[in-house]
Image (cartoon, helix red, strand yellow):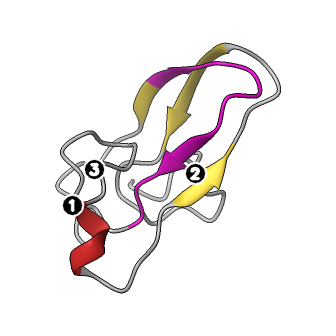
Amino acid sequence: MSSNILKPIKTKLEKDRPYFWCTCGLSENQPLCDGKHKATELKPLNFTVDETKDYFLCGCKKTKKKPFCDGSHK
């Protein structure tokens, strides 16, 4: 797993829409998956949100609250 992003990524997400958070760090569409994980054994994390608003998604991939930033990048 590699990611050059060491900070949270502000992302507007829509209620009840399915999203796929990149777990491999290879996606060019960070923090969301673009299918590049297929060259690895990793799979994206499927998730939805309960409210349409801006969220801070993890860019460093070290969070314990996947897909949301928990400050692990500090």
The quarter of the picture where residue 51 lies is top right
- What residue sits right under mark 2 in the picture? 67
Q: Nearer the viewer, mark 3 or mark 2?
A: 2
Note whether 31 is above or below 54 in the view shown: below
Alpha-carbon span between mark 1 and mark 3: 14 Å
**Considering depth in this image, is 16 or 25 the residue closer to the camera?**
16
The reply to whether dot 3 and dot 2 touch (C-beta < 8 Å) is: no
Which residue is farthest bottom?
41
Tell me if 57 is positioned left or right of 3 in this view: right
Question: Which of the two labelled residues, at mark 2 and mark 1, occupies the earlier sequence position?
Answer: 1
Q: Are marks 2 and 1 in contact (CB under 8 Å)?
A: no
Q: Residue at x 44, y 24 (%)?
A: 10
Q: Nearer the viewer, mark 2 or mark 1?
A: 1
Q: Residue at x 46, y 72 (%)?
A: 43
Residue 36's label in the rendered image is none
- Residue 26 tag number: 1
Residue at image location 21% in from the left, 78% down from the top: 39
Dot 3 lies on which element?
A: loop
Residue most toward the top?
53
- Label 3 – label 2 distance at C-alpha: 14 Å
Determine which of the numbered discs, if any, sits on residue 6 in the image: 3
User: How crowded is the residue under tag 1: few (<14 C-alpha within 10 Å), some, or many (20+)?
Assistant: many
Name the amino acid type tagged 2. Answer: Pro
Amino acid tagged 1: Leu
Relative to residue 24, is residue 53 depicted above or below? Answer: above
Question: What amino acid is found at the position of numbered circle 3 in the picture?
Answer: Leu
Q: What stretch of residues is rendered in magenta?
A: 11-23
Q: Nearer the viewer, residue 67 or 69?
A: 67
